[in-house]
Image: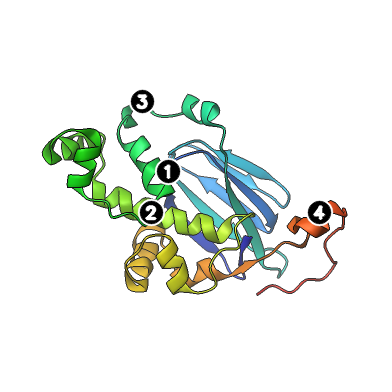
Amino acid sequence: MAIVVNHPLHLAALRFPMMVQVKVWKGRVTLRNQTVCRILEEGQSFVVPTFLRFDCEVMPLAQRPAEFSLTLVADADAADAVVDDGKLWSLPLAREIFAAPQRRWTAAQLAAHWQVTPQKARARLFAEGETLSSLVREQRLVHALHIAASMDDPGARDLSSLASRAGFASVTRFAAACTEIARVPADHLLRTVVRYETLPANRERGLSPPRHRRFF
């Protein structure tokens, strides 16, 4: 799957718990953080380092919809090599939340998992500039984005399903997280399209995508 937009789209402050590959199928994508800016044209891709907060600006070109995908890079050795040493507690926790966003995450449960008091668990996150509630909300949101933009996941076709799969209690809370964290309307994550050449049958036969395709 890939996310398709007919207008400029600005996703802000994304942060994944492992490396993520951003690939541009159509249009142009600009990735930036506080120090680096990378422009990707059609057919190009870039791997964003683990737990790096970045903005993703998507721009349609020549009156065609823009289309891009997000794919997690599962090379744990390479991912660990770029991890910020200052996130010794929050990064592993973010990975657990991303892997199980539907779990009920509380300070008491985290404390039991870490075998410390709830106050100590909160203090560990505070020392790294994090809080449990904000980390849970953020990782649920990027999990939803990954569902919508992954090339190997059929995704969700309605907001209720996508919100539920990402662990949000309601569509309202999911929509609020989208606008407050990533500055994007929640329904933009549903504008997905199956790429013809990625379907197993077509890939095995080496078929190229049709010249004209509908975007929906």
Q: Residue at x 37, y 60 (%)?
A: 167
* Amino acid on which disc 1 is placed: Arg
The residue lying toward the viewer, choosing from 211 and 75, is: 75
Q: Are marks 2 and 1 in contact (CB under 8 Å)?
A: no
* Amino acid on which disc 2 is placed: Pro
- Label whose residue precedes the other's in the sequence (3 or 4): 3
Q: How many residues crowd mark 4 within 10 Å: few (<14), some (14–19), many (20+)?
A: few
Q: Residue at x 58, y 42 (%)?
A: 38
Q: Are marks 3 and 1 in contact (CB under 8 Å)?
A: no
The residue lying toward the viewer, choosing from 187 and 73, is: 73
Kind of element beneath mark 3: helix
Q: How many residues crowd mark 1 within 10 Å: few (<14), some (14–19), many (20+)?
A: some
For residue 203, the mark is 4
* Amino acid on which disc 3 is placed: Asp
Q: How many marks?
A: 4
Q: Residue at x 83, y 52 (%)?
A: 204
Q: Position of residue 202 (x, y in %)?
A: 82, 59
Q: CA distance from mark 2 to mark 1?
A: 19 Å
Q: Which residue is mark 3?
A: 85
Q: Quadrant of residue 171?
A: bottom left
Of the two numbered discs 3 and 1 in the rendering, the one whose residue sits closer to the viewer:
3
Q: Quadrant of residue 103?
A: bottom left
- Label whose residue precedes the other's in the sequence (2 or 4): 2
Q: Which residue is mark 1?
A: 53
